[in-house]
Amino acid sequence: MAGSSQKKQAVSNIQSLKEIHTLSLVINLVTLIVLFSFNRPSSKKIFIIFTIPLLICEYIIEKTGRPKYDSSGKLVSSGEDLKQSGLTEYMFDIIYFTLICDILMIVFGSNKVWYLYLAIPGFASYKLFGLIKAGRALLGGGSSKTENSTEEQTPAKSKRQAKLEARGNRQRVQAR
């Protein structure tokens, strides 16, 4: 038995999947028409190679995000939330980036726009480097400071903390 939040997520997932599949279908059909009718750009091999990541990401999103219903129509599983951040978000980014490159390939008539696709592994390596750097800092291997230098440093106080401390140190005199 599914709760209302699972039903809302299932509806949201179906809507997201419908939008991404429609957008992908339209842009890829237009691209194929331009490729074969105008023979622009002349090499179709590069388009096919760079469409493979789009198809893989769409397949993964479809399999993980599509809600599952039993034979009576009741919701069994709402699927993974397609609005979540992380790997799902990156897959959507790859899909949109590939579609943008398809549009640019149509507009400019050149396969040179696929050099923009190098931004994807560049961004992935940037994120991976940040993750490794954070892991090293967490394990203590990333800093060159010694224990004595961390003890000597005292954090600076904000203005509010300084005022409250000054008020607390004053002698209070009560009037009779």
Image: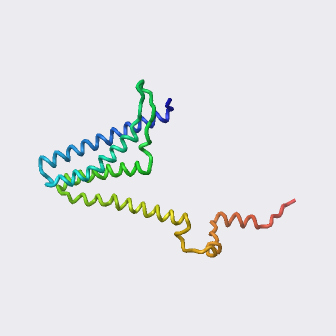
Quadrant occupied by the C terminus: bottom right
Q: Please state the horizontal and vertical placement of residue 100, each as a whole percent of the image.
A: 27, 52
Residue toward you, 41 or 168? 41
Left or right of residue 148, residue 76 in this image? left
Left or right of residue 109, residue 54 in this image? right
Point 49% across, 35% down: residue:
5
Point 38% across, 36% down: residue:
14
Q: Please state the horizontal and vertical placement of residue 40, each as a whole percent of the image.
A: 14, 53
State the scheme by which the image is colored.
Answer: rainbow
Point 32% across, 42% down: residue:
20
Q: Please state the horizontal and vertical placement of residue 120, each as a whole percent of the image.
A: 33, 58
Whether residue 27 is situated above or below residue 72 in the rendered picture = below
Whether residue 114 is situated above or below residue 153 in the rendered picture = above
Q: Please state the horizontal and vertical placement of residue 76, each as a whole percent of the image.
A: 45, 32
Point 30% across, 41% down: residue:
21
Residue toward you, 11 or 145? 145
Whether residue 5 is situated above or below residue 54 in the rendered picture = above
Residue 109 sits in quarter: bottom left
Left or right of residue 58, residue 136 in this image? right
Q: Residue furthest right?
A: 176
Question: How many numbered marks appear?
Answer: 0
Residue toward you, 29 or 125? 125
Left or right of residue 67, residue 45 in this image? left
